[in-house]
Amino acid sequence: MPYTLDDVTRIVLQAKEKAYRETDLEPEPQYTTEVEWPIQCTVGPGLEGAIACETKIGYVNGAKGWLIYRGYDVFDLCAHSTFEETSFLLLHGRLPTAQELDVFCRTLRRRMFIPRTQRVLLSFPVEERNPMDALRLGTNLMRQKQTRNERDNTGEDTLASDDDSIPMETKPEGRKHPVYEFLARLFKPVTVIEPTADVVPDDVESFYNLIAGVAAVSATIGRARQGRMPLEPLPDLSFAGNYLYMLSGRRPTPLEERVMDICLILHADHGMNASTFASMVVASTLSDIYLAIGAGISALSGPLHGGANVEVVNMLDEIGSASAVPKWYKTALEEKRKIMGFGHRVYKAYDPRARILAPLAEMLAEEHPELRNTYETARALEREVVATLGEKKKVFPNVDFYSGIVYRSMGIPADMYTTIFAVSRVSGWCARVAEYIENNRIFRPRAIYTGTFEEKYIPVQNRGEN
Ligand code: ACO
């Protein structure tokens, strides 16, 4: 019998039950108690243990394996919410009313229409570039809308979300600064939104544009890589559904739409990870939100971070089958290789996101026989790694281990997987930047200098050979 949407909810809630059975539910006081700055903390290499700021957005309990967005457990959000609702929650600090959610969904859908950005983006050979590099480029190109001088306040978005109403030869009037600049004195907290209005404060505009636009840019890149033109969003599809449609040109099945929605919810925020921190560091200089998000995309692309999801499927293909796992793993251990999709700086328990993605991958492997071998290989590798490194080094599967299998079931090419991570995480990046900038202080750590002093300068012609 084919799986239904109810089955997906059941799978998520079963994963929650298992997680709750295996972990007790106490927050860690050292990461959940308000502090008086400055504070003392023990910092390891890679800023391990460093506390950079306070936040109300999200909490990762690495010892127990939970993930909380604004007080809500990610298991509950995956079971009952949508990516649109979760993004609203992250940005605005509370769940929307039905009317707010409706406006927000329509706003995002409309802003997935970015013909001007697509036109400029496609003038580059994006199909030849790394998709994350192309995504960063497209994200920066989206800024063009923000050169528009004044919004019309009719409540109607008469322009495409990246359209520029000012012809180049028109003398600019109105705002002295484009709104994408972070001017602390202009920046207002984003917690208030008029429920009935179809307009939002300028500061928030950019966040909405980015959440919708990064998805549209990712889809455009995916299309370009297949030699195809971009597609416009459809009015009857959700954010996840439209993303899949704009990427593949095929209306997703309700099951695919729901599973992608869960993937987007799961990846939306995750503490002070490298890409979030990169975005915040750039924003803390009062740079520009589009450049800040571009920094997040750059950091996410690395194989130690979001890029691991691509590496995982390549690794599983290389292993080839479940029976080949023991030999492959033995060699990997001997060569002291890091196994992609395992381990985490914060989680020293099972990553809750992997708890959800693993059974979803299993469900999809049952629906898609061609995926069974990959799924079985993944399961066998997980058993080996957890048996050898689980107890000893607290190394368990992370979010990237099963996500690739899920995306493969939807026919998405592997090199697009990390862009999907960005499509989701942009809402966390925006929320964290918005929160931090309210009480901004530029990030500026120190390094311990271990070099020499009092070197005598020798002119180049007198230096001889090395
Ligand atoms: N495979 C094998 N051993 C591992 C792995 C792994 N994937 N991850 C950690 N370990 C071991 C380390 O070798 C180390 O052992 P040691 O104490 O004997 O030296 C110990 O576990 C601690 O690991 P660190 O490398 O100190 O962990 P760190 O916090 O610096 O790195 C990271 C975390 C980058 C995620 C690491 O686990 C890794 O490289 N994983 C593979 C890449 C990956 O999956 N990245 C995605 C992470 S999730 C995300 O970003 C969305």
Image (cartoon, rainbow, N blue to C red):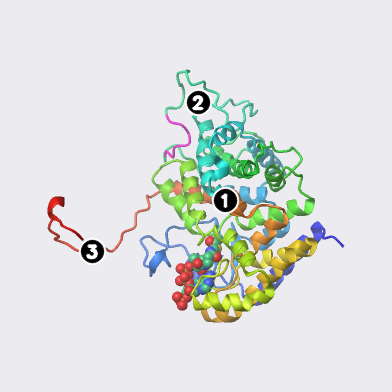
Residue position marked by numbered label 3 in the rendering: 451
Counting from the top left corner in percent of width and height, residue 297 is at 51, 50
What is the crowding at mark 3: few (fewer than 14 residues within 10 Å), some, or many (at least 20)?
A: few
Which one is earlier in the sequence, the residue at label 2 or at label 3? Answer: 2
Magenta region? 177-183
| Rendering quarter of residue 462 | bottom left
Instruction: Compare residues 165 and 130 and report the one nearer the observer.
Output: 130
Which of the two discs, 2 and 1, sits closer to the camera? 1
Local SS, label 1: helix
Instruction: Compare residues 303 and 350 and report the one nearer the observer.
Output: 303
Residue position marked by numbered label 2 in the rendering: 149
Q: Cα distance, mark 1 to mark 3? A: 38 Å
Local SS, label 2: loop
Q: Cα distance, mark 2 to mark 1? A: 29 Å
Q: In which quadrant is the N terminus drawn?
A: bottom right
Q: Is residue 79 above or below residue 14?
A: above
Counting from the top left corner in percent of width and height, residue 389 is at 55, 78
Q: Residue at coordinates 51% horizontally, 60% vertically from top-left?
A: 303
Q: What amino acid is at disc 3?
A: Gly
